[in-house]
Amino acid sequence: MSTIPSTTIISNLKTVTSSTANTLKSANTNGIDMPGMLALALSKASELKVCLNLLVRSTDSADPNLTALNDILASFS
């Protein structure tokens, strides 16, 4: 699988750990719900997977975009 930015982002999202106390304090001070935003990002990644699956089903096998789409989908595994 080739490495493209989309797959790196998705792979990193799947391995996110809890934020440190200092990060949470700083985020809360600035009105940012860090755990909530991370959970939202993960749910949006799941929505992206569904959309990409639909695109792959409709993409011609000769289309060069199919490789990139399949690489991104593979990063969800």
Image (spheres, rainbow, N blue to C red):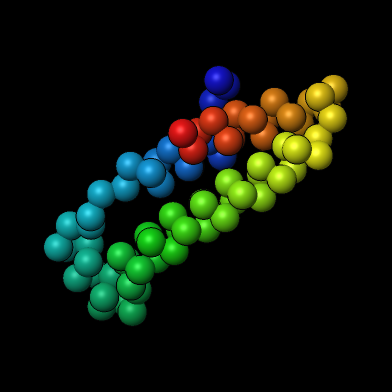
- Does any portion of residue 5 appear in the rendered image? no
Residue farthest toward the left in the current orientation of the protein: 21
The location of residue 2, given as percent across then percent down, is 57, 21
User: Is 59 above or below relative to 13?
Assistant: above
Q: Residue at x 38, y 61 (%)?
A: 39
Instruction: Determine whether, in the image, residue 56 is placed left or right of residue 19.
Output: right
Instruction: Determine whether, in the image, residue 76 is placed left or right of residue 67.
Output: left
Q: How many marks?
A: 0
User: Is 38 above or below relative to 64?
Assistant: below
Q: Nearer the viewer, residue 32 or 68?
A: 68
User: Is 64 above or below relative to 76?
Assistant: above
The location of residue 12, given as percent across then percent down, is 40, 41
The location of residue 30, given as percent across then percent down, is 32, 77
Q: Nearer the viewer, residue 57 or 20?
A: 57
The location of residue 34, given as percent across then percent down, is 32, 66
Q: Residue at x 46, y 33 (%)?
A: 77
